Image (spheres, helix red, strand yellow):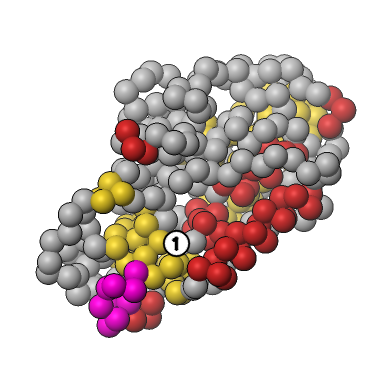
Amino acid sequence: MLISLQDTGRAGLRHWGVPASGALDWLAHSLASRVVGNSAELASLEMTGAGARLHFSELTIIALVGADFGAELDDQPIALGRALLVRPNSELTFSQRRSGARCYLAIAGGFNIAPQLGSQSCLLGAPWSGHLAQPLRIGDQLSYNQPDLTIAGRGLDTMSIDSSQSPIRYLPNRNLNGSIQRHFQAETWCISSKSNRMGYRCEGQALAAPANRVRSFGVVPGTIQLPPDGQPIVLLADAQTTGGYPVLGVVIRADLPKLAQHLPSEYLQFQPIGLTLAERAFAEQLNLLKANFEPEPDFMVAPI
């Protein structure tokens, strides 16, 4: 459905109107990267909804983390979260989607592609050419760097890839009418087919959007906007940097990976949470990353 190069994104450029981009499931990308010995600042392939047929012309090592699309290497099933030796002329295929929405393929040494504005992340429709402005197509070729063969067989001790239907936690805007918040929390929202990497459009019983106009202000991935039609929009990594709609709240960073593991036509519910618990949930994810790798790496996560 959509395959693109994604890393931790473009930090520090939002004041120039440049979206962060980067992996929607930053946790899966970071885990895949570290399995093959990469910094998370090196891009992986973000595969959405299904996999592809990938031909490897040279020896390398790969790891897959995230959604389970039934991966097979030369027709043999392979496990997620393992550093796998790939021999020349091997093919990686995917049989069926079993769980989740996005799977990340990291390759040892990284892809040999020049960054744009300090990142190897694809920003769809960006004003530059090549794979960092458009998704991969049939017949595209990517070169990759030489791997460190000693990492073959390395794997994760634990993985936390959550595609469950449990509520998405968010920090509510306390200045918004309480009845609107209660309606938002009680409703089960369907992700619209009009959704993309800029944001998930949610469909359900319309909320009573405030009549007063709002001046444009800065927004970040996870911001939940309330447009006049009363159907919320949850902004994602490729979203614009400012917005003028009222805001219901912001999805906590720890739940952005879970949000990313849902596809259009699937359902979401939202649960309010306090700042202290939100910070604790994020700290637990960072501890998960640290627990898998010794010595402790200097992890990078998706920027705001």
Q: Position of residue 81 (x, y in %)?
A: 74, 46
Instruction: Give residue 42's quadrant in the image.
Output: top right
In-image side of 4 versus 205 (left or right): right
How many badges with numbers are in the image? 1
Q: Is-magenta flag for residue 158? A: no
Q: Residue at x 78, y 44 (%)?
A: 296
At mark 1, the secondary structure is strand
Q: Position of residue 275 (x, y in %)?
A: 50, 68
In-image side of 268 versus 211 (left or right): right
Q: Is residue 40 above or below residue 232?
A: above
Q: Nearer the viewer, residue 149 or 264?
A: 149
Q: Residue at x 68, y 18 (%)?
A: 145
Q: Nearer the viewer, residue 250 or 145?
A: 250
The segment highlighted magenta reads 173-181
To which residue does mark 1 refer?
A: 251
In-image side of 106 versus 236 (left or right): right
Q: Position of residue 39 (x, y in %)?
A: 67, 33
Q: Is residue 213 above or below residue 75?
A: below
Q: Amino acid at mark 1?
A: Val
Q: Is residue 63 above or below residue 221?
A: above
Q: Position of residue 167 (x, y in %)?
A: 50, 71
- Asked if residue 227 can be seen in this view, the reply is yes
Mark 1 closeness class: few <14, some 14–19, many ≥20 residues within 10 Å: many
Q: Residue at x 26, y 51 (%)?
A: 217
Which of the image's four quarters has the N terminus?
A: top left
Q: Residue at x 43, y 71 (%)?
A: 270
- Asked if residue 268 can be seen in this view, the reply is no
